[in-house]
Image: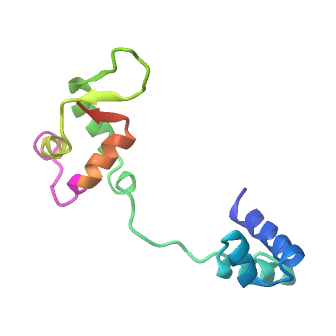
Amino acid sequence: MNRIDRRRFQARVVLDHCNGNTSQARYLFGWDQRTTRKALLEKKKGKVIADLPRSGRKSFSEKLPNLPTDIRSLVDPNSQTHPTFKTTFRYTRMTAKAVLEALTKEKGYKSEELPALSTMRELLGKMGYRQR
């Protein structure tokens, strides 16, 4: 369900079950009042109101598209799967700090453009690596 369909649904529910009261919908369903107001306005006007452009920090995969490939090339030779093959995780002896150092030394990244240590730990976890 995309955002437009979700707002259409919310508008119907707010009108049918909450008598058009957006604060009651917030209390009952936990929906954002601004979203339900927008949904009701769209239903009243009969056309979709454009969403505001999204802002925020770009992810590292957008800033550095080769980063996951470079991390895998460094970590895979130092990793192994679980002996029972019950999990999909790969266990590695490389720490997140060692990966950051190897990226700067071997792959030519600048330390300023790389993620912080805690972010690198999280990224390694998302990529399926566990430290052993």
Instruction: Please indicate whether residue 25 sits to the left or right of residue 105 in the image.
Output: right
Which part of the image, by quadrant, shows the C terminus? top left
Q: Which residues are magenta?
A: 104-117
* Above or below, comparing residue 81 to residue 67 in the picture: above
Give percent across and percent down for residue 72. Answer: 29, 34
* Most foreground residue, 91 or 120: 91
- Most foreground residue, 92 or 44: 92
Residue 84 as seen in the image, left or right of residue 116: right
Quadrant position of residue 49: bottom right
Between 67 and 75, the one nearer to me in the picture: 75
Q: How is the image coloured?
A: rainbow
- In the image, what residue occupies the spot 32% across and 34% down? 129
Left or right: where does residue 12 sit relative to residue 1? right
Whether residue 108 appears in magenta in the rendering, the answer is: yes
Is residue 38 shown left or right of residue 58?
A: right
* Residue occupying image coordinates x 69% and y 65%: 3
Residue 21's image quarter? bottom right
Q: Residue at x 36, y 48 (%)?
A: 65
Q: Is residue 66 visible?
A: no
Q: Residue furthest right?
A: 16
